């Protein structure tokens, strides 16, 4: 903020922290894409799906997004059973899986409740199936009433968005 005194010389006035925050705050926050000016189309609008002769052709942006999702799925899948960097174990009837609390909590409200210690957020039947303990500074979640192979597929799906289903599970 600048003020002018009687001799027409500008004097710089200090801004309070609140004034600094207000002056440096953007008008709008956008997650993912920058805003476009009115009248301009965004990249998403410019790269609409193209269909010719009934055959769908993905745009470059869609191909790029699909490749990113494939890499993310693969990278998260590589975290599974990394005992060296996991912070939690699932014990399903004696079958142990090394997992990560942040991924479980992000993908499941039930696991988020267990990890945060808010068992009261779970239905009674789910509360009875779960026990927690700590072993070597890692949370251990004991799940006694689930089939290990099915729980394994659930965890794989939580990490990768994929699972293998057949008659046995």
Image (tube, helix red, strand yellow):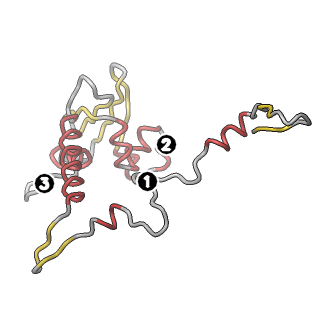
Residue 70 on image: x %, y %: 18, 48
Residue at image position (37%, 21%) is 137
Residue at image position (44%, 52%) is 31
C-beta proximity under 8 Å, tags 2 and 3:
no
Closest to the camera, between mark 2 and mark 1, is 1
Q: Decide if residue 57 is on the left or right side of residue 20.
A: left
Residue ID for mark 3 = 169
Q: Quadrant of the C terminus?
A: bottom left
Seen from the viewer's position, the closer of residues 120 and 111 is 111
C-beta proximity under 8 Å, tags 3 and 1:
no
Residue ID for mark 1 = 34
Seen from the viewer's position, the closer of residues 13 and 144 is 13
Q: Quadrant of the N terminus?
A: top right
Q: Marks 2 and 3, how far apart in space? A: 30 Å
Is tag 2's residue or tag 3's residue first in the polypeptide sequence?
2
Residue 51 on image: x %, y %: 16, 75
Is tag 3's residue or tag 1's residue first in the polypeptide sequence?
1
Q: Residue furthest bottom?
A: 53
Residue ID for mark 2 = 118
Which quadrant of the figure has residue 148? top left
Q: Residue furthest left?
A: 167
């Amino acid at each position: 903020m600048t003020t002018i005194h009687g001799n027409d010389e500008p004097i710089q006035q200090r801004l309070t922290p609140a004034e600094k925050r207000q002056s440096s705050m953007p008008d709008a926050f956008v997650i993912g894409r920058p805003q476009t000016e009115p009248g301009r189309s965004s990249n998403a609008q410019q790269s609409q799906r193209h269909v010719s002769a009934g055959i769908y052709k993905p745009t470059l942006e869609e191909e790029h997004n699909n490749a990113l999702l494939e890499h993310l799925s693969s990278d998260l899948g590589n975290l599974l059973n990394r005992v060296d960097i996991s912070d939690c174990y699932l014990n399903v009837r004696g079958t142990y899986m090394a997992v990560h609390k942040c991924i479980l909590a992000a993908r499941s409200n039930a696991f988020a409740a267990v990890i945060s210690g808010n068992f009261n957020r779970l239905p009674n039947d789910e509360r009875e199936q779960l026990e927690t303990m700590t072993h070597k500074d890692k949370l251990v979640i004991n799940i006694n009433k689930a089939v290990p192979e099915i729980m394994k597929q659930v965890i794989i799906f939580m990490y990768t968005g994929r699972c293998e289903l057949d008659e046995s599970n």
